[in-house]
Image (spheres, rainbow, N blue to C red):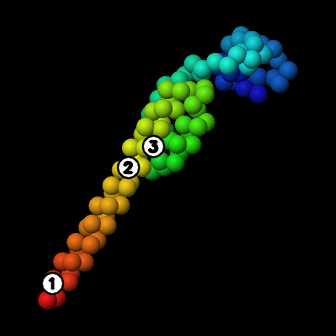
Amino acid sequence: MFCPNCGSSVDENAEICLHCGVNVLKFNNQVNVAKNDNPNIWVNVLSLCCFPLLGIILYFIWKDTQPKAAKSALIFALCGLALSVIMMIIAFVIGVVAEMMNDSYYY
Ligand SMILES: [Zn+2]
């Protein structure tokens, strides 16, 4: 398993993490918010540009442990979704306009 405090691998039966000295058993019993609960810029960028689903999935994974990061991932994911819908509409309009221009070219 991994130390909930510093993330190093810890012996399954160990009580205390050798790396940071945290009591792993106690730590695991506490339902606490992760210390590094910061919006993850890479996740946000990825959600915005390529994979809106990623942000939504991460939101559900993170919402209990990293509420801030989860919320920002969700916001970026929704922006990414909105952007891709807008891009699709623009591409569709351009396609229709191009077709109309092609038609009028022949007449
Ligand atoms: Zn540790």
The answer as to whether callout 2 falls within 8 Å of ligand 1 is no
Q: Position of residue 69 (x, y in %)?
A: 50, 29
In the image, 2 versus 88, the foreground residue is: 88
Mark 3 element type: helix
- The residues bearing labels 2 and 1 have C-alpha atoms spaced at a distance of 34 Å
Q: Nearer the viewer, mark 2 or mark 1?
A: 2
In the image, 78 versus 54, the foreground residue is: 78
Figure quadrant of the N terminus: top right
- The residues bearing labels 3 and 1 have C-alpha atoms spaced at a distance of 41 Å
Task: Specify few, some or many for label 3: CA neighbours under 10 Å numbering under 14, 14-19, or 20 or more.
Answer: many
Q: Position of residue 53 (x, y in %)?
A: 52, 48
> Which tag, 2 or 1, sits closer to the chain's start?
2
Q: Who's the residue at 27% across and 66% down the image?
A: 93
The image's mark for residue 105 is 1
> Which tag, 3 or 1, sits closer to the chain's start?
3
Against 87, is 95 above or below?
A: below
Q: Amino acid at mark 2?
A: Ala
The single residue placed furthest to the right in the displayed view is 13
Q: Amino acid at mark 1?
A: Tyr
- The residues bearing labels 3 and 2 have C-alpha atoms spaced at a distance of 9 Å
Q: Who's the residue at 29% across and 61% down the image?
A: 90
Q: Tell me whether the residue at label 3 lies in contact with that at label 1, contact meaning CB atoms closer than 8 angstroms.
A: no
The image's mark for residue 82 is 2
Asked if residue 81 can be seen in this view, the reply is yes
Q: Which residue is mark 3?
A: 77
